[in-house]
Amino acid sequence: MTSTLSRPAPAPAPVPPTQAQAAPAADPWHWSVTGASLLAVLAAATSLNGVVEPWTWLPPVVRTLVPVLLAMALTRTLRLSAVLAPLAGVLALVGTLTAQFFPRQSILGVVPGPGTSLQLQRLLAQAEETVVSQVAPVLPGAGIFLVMCAALGLIAIIVDLFAVTMRMPAASGLGLLAVMVAPAIVKPNGVGMFAFLATVMAYLLLLAVAQWRENRLASGGAQASSGFAGRSMIIGAAALAVTVVLPLFVPGFNSGAFPQGARLNVWGNATGLNPAVTLGNDLRNPTGFGRIAYSTNSDSPLYLRAVTLEDFSGRRWEPDQRIGDRDRGVTEIGEERGAPEDAPEAQTVFTRITTQSYASPWLLAPYSPVGISNLLGTWAWDPANLSILATDGGSTARQRYLVESRAAELTRDGLGAIRPSDPDAVPEIFTQLPDDTPDIVRTTTEEIAGEFVNPYDKALAIQNFLRGPDFTYSVEAPVDGGYDGSGMDVMARFLESKSGYCVHYAGTMAVMARAAGIPSRVAIGYTPGSPTGNTEEGPEGTELREFIVDSRNAHAWPELYFEGVGWVQFEPTPSRGVVPTYAQQAFAPVGPRADDTDALNPGSLPDVTGQAGSTAEGSDAADNAGANGASDDARPVDGLLAVTGIALLAFLPFLARTARTRSRRRAVAGTGAFADTDGAATAAWAETTEIAGDYGYPLQPTDTPRTFAGRLARDAALAAEPATSLARLKSAFEYEEYAGHGAGIQVPEISSGGLRPSATMARPTVLPRWDDVDTLTRALRSGSSRRTRIRARLFPQSLLNRFRSSVRR
C-alpha cells in the first residue's frame, strides 16, 4: 500500500563509454535565432522611412545584413570558438561594404584595395553634406547609404551576439533601440506607429525563438514545452496593445519619440535653422529653441535672412552654396548682381546680433548687408543673393557681430510705375520654371494676374489671393495631407487644399510670380520677433532696440525682382510676419504688429494689417475653422485605431487559448497514438481539464484524475460517447503519468473512506486520439448556456488560472 502519488524515478540507464565521452550535442537551432535577429533589425530599420526616401534603403541594407549574419551562423555551425563569430561578422561587413560601395578600388571584389581610403573620405563628405543641407526624407545617395549600412551591420552583429552567443536575447533590444534613435531625432512625428509596432513584434518574436532554442538545448533536442515563450508573447502583445490604445484616450500622451509625437531633441538647444526648409519641424515645436537676440535702429520691422532658394527644378528646394563663386571676407560686401546703378534712397541700418545657442553655417543678417564686423571665423558672401556662408567649417554659435545694411525707401507708386524687367537683368536661375510645373500653377496664375501688365500689380494680386479668406494657416494640415515640404507637387497639393504654413505660401508665390514673368526666389530666416524693451548704444551714437527670436519665428518669404529697384520682399502668409507698407492693399491702414511669437496659434494673432472688428474676427474664425477641420479629419483615423486596439485587446485571450490548443493538438497528433508520442497523453489531459474549467467544471487542487473525471461525468451529465472519450483520456494520462515506460505500477485509489489498497495499472488497450478531446468539448458546449459558451471562447478561465498558479495537472 503506497502513501504518496509521487512518480517514482526510473533507474538510470547504463551509458556506453563511447557516448559518455562524446562531444556536446550540436546546436542547429541557433539558425532560427539568427533569422529572428535579421527580422528584428530590418523591422527597426523601417523607422528610416522618412529619414531617407521610403524603402530606397532596403536593398543595400539587405545586401549588407544577410552576408554578415550568414557568416556568423556558419561559424557556429562549424563549432568554432565563440569569439570567432563576431569577428567573422565584422569581416563579412567589410567585404559587403567594399563590394557595394568600393568595387573599383577593391581586390577580388570584397577586399579593400588602393584608393579605398580616398573614396571613403569622399563618400563620408557626401553624407555629411546630405545631413547638413537636405531636409528629411533625404534623397538616396551612396554616401548616406554607406553610413546606414555600416551602422546597421554593426548593430546586427551586436544583436546576434547578445541573442545567440551570449544567450541574452532581452539585451539585444538595446541595439534595436539604437536604430530608432536617429529617426526619433530627425522625423517630426517620431519613429512612427508602423515602425514601432513592427519593431516590438519582431523583438517579441526574437525573445520567443530564443526561449524555444533554450528549451531544446535543455531537453537535449527533444520536443520541449513552449509555455514560457507563449506567455511572454501574450504579455508583450497585451502591453503593445495598451501602448497603442492608451494615447488615444488619455490626454498628455501625444508627445514623445516612441512611437510618435514631438521630435526628440538630444542635442539640447544648440540647434540652428536648416536652410533646406525644415521650418515645419521648428514651427511645430511649442517650446522653441535656437534663441537669438538682436538690437537694431531700423524704423520698420526687421527680417533676419539666412539664405535664399532659387532652383525650383528638384523634388525639394535647397540652397546652392556656389563655393567657387563666393567672395571671401565680409568686412566689406559689394553690390549684388542685378542691383541698379541708380539705387533708390536707402536708410543705413545697424543691427547687432547675438546668436547664443543658434548654430548654423549660414549667417543671419538683414537684407541687404554692406559690411559685417566682430565676426569670428572665415566667411564668404555670394554676389548672386548676398547670402553669407562659413567656409572653414565654423558656425554662428555664440557669436556677437554687427551688421551694416541698407533698407531702400519703397512706395506703392514707385513700384507700380516699373515695367517688366529685361530677361538678362538677373541670372537665368531666378526665372526658370521646370517642365513638370503643374497645370494648376499656370492656370491659377493666369486667372489671378493675367489681366495685369505691370509686375507690381501682378505680384500684389498673387499675394492678396494667397492671403484671402479661402486660405488658412496650419502647420499640421500639410502633415495630415501628405504634402509637407517643398517641390512642385507640393505646391499643387497646397493650391488644392488651401492650407499650409510659410514654406507653402512663399514657395507658391515665387513659382506663380515666375509664371507671371517676374524673377523670384524664396528667402529663409526669421520674422521680427518680440521686443524686450531694452536698448543699447550703437555706432555713431545710434540707439538700438532689442528683440528676441527663436525657432517659433522661423519663416520663409518670397523676394521678387523689379528692374531699377532690385529684390523686393513680399508677405503672402496669413497670420504670420509683417506685410510691408508698399505691399498692403490700398484700403488697409498702416501699422502692422512686429511681434508674432505666438505663431503656433494663428487665431490668437491680430490681423497683420492692423484691422479690427469684423475683418479680424473673420480671419480668426477662418483660422480656427481650418484647425478644427484638420482635427475633424483626423478623428476617423483615431477612431479606427481605437476600435482596432480594443478589438486586439478583446481577442487576445481567444487567440492565446487557440494557439495553445493547436500546439497540444500537434503534439498529440504527431503519430496518431499516445504510445509513440512522449507527453501526448499529458497534453490531451491538460486540454481536457482546461476546457472543462472554461465551461464551469474546474479542476480542484486535491483532485486525482479519477475523482475529477467522475465529478465531471456526473455534473455535466456525460453519457455514451463523451463519457467513453473521457475515460480513455483519463486512463491514458494515468498510465503516462504514473507508469511511464515501466511495466506496471501500484496506484492507490481514493474513496470516501480514504485510501484503499492499490491495484496494478495495466497499459490501456484502446489509446485515445485528439478526437476524444473534440468529442468532450462538443458535449460540454452543447450542454452550456449561450453566455457560458461565449465566455469560454472569448475569456477562457483556464488562461487566467495558468498565470495565477503552476499547479500540476
Image (tube, rainbow, N blue to C red):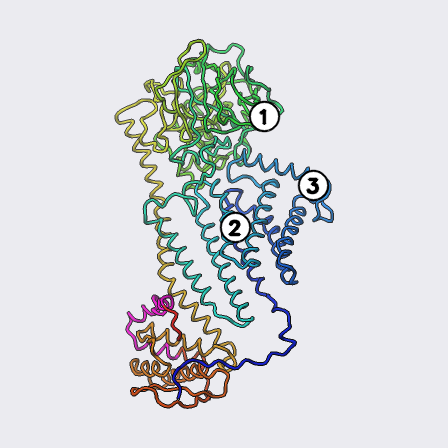
Q: Nearer the viewer, residue 602 or 128?
A: 128
Q: Quarter of the image for the N terminus: give it.
A: bottom left
Q: Nearer the viewer, residue 76 or 724?
A: 76
- Which element carries disc 3, helix, strand or loop? helix
Q: Amino acid at mark 3?
A: Thr
Asked if the residue under mark 2 is in contact with the one under mark 1, i.e. CB atoms within 8 Å, the reply is: no
- Residue at 39% across, 19% down: 546
Residue 736 x, y percent position in the rendering: 46, 81
Q: Which residue is mark 1?
A: 391
Q: Which residue is mark 2?
A: 175
- Left or right: where does residue 650 sit relative to residue 95? left
Distance (Cα) linking label 3 and label 2: 28 Å
Residue 257 is marked as none
- Left or right: where does residue 172 sit relative to residue 111? left
Distance (Cα) linking label 1 and label 2: 37 Å
Q: Magenta residues? A: 775-804
**Which quarter of the picture shows residue 793?**
bottom left
**Which quarter of the picture shows residue 232?**
bottom left
Q: Which residue is mark 3?
A: 116
Question: Which circle, 3 or 2, is nearer the viewer?
Answer: 2
Q: Is residue 520 visible to the viewer in this orientation of the structure? A: yes
Q: Amino acid at mark 2?
A: Gly
Q: Quarter of the image for the C terminus: give it.
A: bottom left
Magenta stretch contains residue 778: yes
